[in-house]
Amino acid sequence: MIPKLDTKEKNFHGLLAIGGLAGIVEGSLRYGFTLHTVFPGMALTLVAAFVGAFCGFFLKDALRTMNGLPPYRGINHDGWMMGAFMGSFVGTLFQVANSANGANLVVGSMAGAYFGALLGAFPDEFITPILELMQADQSERFVSEEERLH
């Protein structure tokens, strides 16, 4: 009944979760346990990811046009979303490790999401076909295992 999420949707929800958790922890350190800092953490992390993806695609198009290639028109956007999710996770962990009291977790999440999306925009056209091949291979394996049982 509930549709299966694709890779981009899973990473989007993970990005929101990491930003929200970073907001909760940072707000709780400052004000005691609080939930009103969830939305700012999510929103700031998401905006940083979108700005990073924009900058990444802009740089990618600039480099392509300087080399005489046509600009890339992103269709799937799996690469930058995966990069933003992993970047926000690593940025938050990096901020936890470097901070004496765990402050500025949202800043670590934002910086990680920005750089992850920026770097994930460059291999964007290669990510979706690789994911489709991996899913096709997985479904073939599942069918062959069912056939062996019967």
Image (cartoon, rainbow, N blue to C red):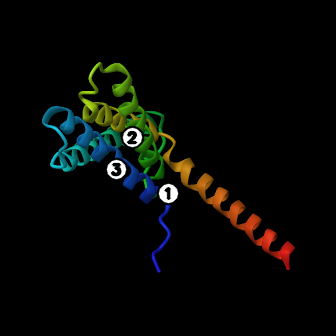
x and y, in percent, of residue 45 in the image: 28, 42
Residue 39 visible in the displayed image: yes
Is 18 on the left or on the right of 69, as rendered?
left
What residue is shown with label 2? 117
Q: Nearer the viewer, mark 1 or mark 2?
A: 1
Which residue: 72% across, 60% down? 137
x and y, in percent, of residue 35 in the image: 19, 49
Looking at marks 2 and 3 on the same chain, the residue that comes earlier in the sequence is marked by 3
What residue is shown with label 1? 7
Q: Considering the numbered disc 2 on the image, is that residue within a helix, a strand or a loop?
A: helix
What residue is shown with label 3? 17
Residue 144, located in which quarter of the rendered image?
Answer: bottom right
Which residue: 47% across, 65% down? 5
In the image, residue 1 above or below residue 45: below
Residue 58, located in which quarter of the rendered image?
Answer: top left
Residue furthest front in the image: 32
Q: Nearer the viewer, mark 2 or mark 3?
A: 3
Residue 53, located in which quarter of the rendered image?
Answer: top left
Q: Residues within 10 Å of mark 3 (few under 14, many from 20)?
A: some
Residue type at numbered disc 1: Thr
Residue type at numbered disc 3: Ala
